[in-house]
Image: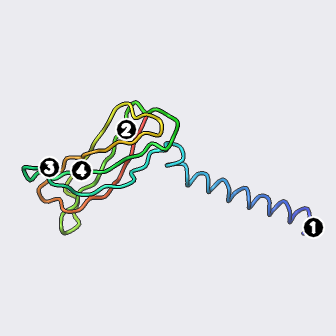
Amino acid sequence: MGEKSIKRCIFSLVLICFIITMICSTSVAESGLKVVDWNWKRGAYGNKFLSGTLKNYSRKQYSYVQIVFNLYDDHDALVGNAMANVNNLEPNGSWNFKAIVIEDKATKARLTDVTGF
C-alpha cells in the first residue's frame, strides 16, 4: 500500500468518524431543547406531579413544545405517562413545566421525549 493510499484511508476514517459524531449529536444540537432538571412534587391536596425546567438553547422560537415521562410502579412496571406542553417558547427561553401524574401507583418516572416545532 502506497503513501497516497494510506493518506486516503486515514482521511476517509476521519471523515466517517466526523459524520458519525454529527449524526449522534443532532438531537439536542438540532432542537436546542433540553430538560435541565426535574423532580417529584405534591400539591396542596396530595396530587402528584413532575416539575422542572426546560431550556431552549437555540435562536429558534418554538410554537409548540411537549415533554413526555414514562411512569413506573415499585416493581418497575410501566403504569402510564405524564405530559406537559407549552406554546410560543422564545429563543433562549426557559419553561417551568408541571406534568400531572394521575396514576396512583406511579412511584418512578423517566423522561422519554421532548418534541418541539
Measure the C-alpha gap from mark 3 to mark 2: 21 Å
* Position of residue 54 measured from the top left corner of the image (x, y, whole percent): 38, 47
In this rendering, would 101 be left or right of 116? left
- Residue 39: where, in percent of width, then height? 27, 57
Residue 12 vs 92, above or below: the answer is below
Pointer 1 or 4: first along the chain: 1
Residue ID for mark 3: 102
Mark earlier in primary sequence (1, 2):
1
In the rendered structure, which disc, 3 or 4, sits on the residue that comes first in sequence? 4
Q: Residue at x 15, y 54 (%)?
A: 42
Query: Looking at the image, which residue is at 17% across and 59% down?
Result: 106
Mark sitting on residue 45: none
10 Å neighbourhood of mark 2: few (<14), some, or many (≥20)?
some
Residue bearing mark 4:
81
Residue type indicated by callout 2: Val
Is mark 3 in CB contact (under 8 Å) with mark 4?
A: no
Q: Secondary structure at mark 3?
A: loop
Label 1, label 3: how far apart the Cα atoms are: 67 Å
Sequence-first disc among 2 and 4: 2
**For the residue labelled by badge 4, is the local secondary structure a helix, a strand or a loop?**
strand
Callout 2: SS: strand
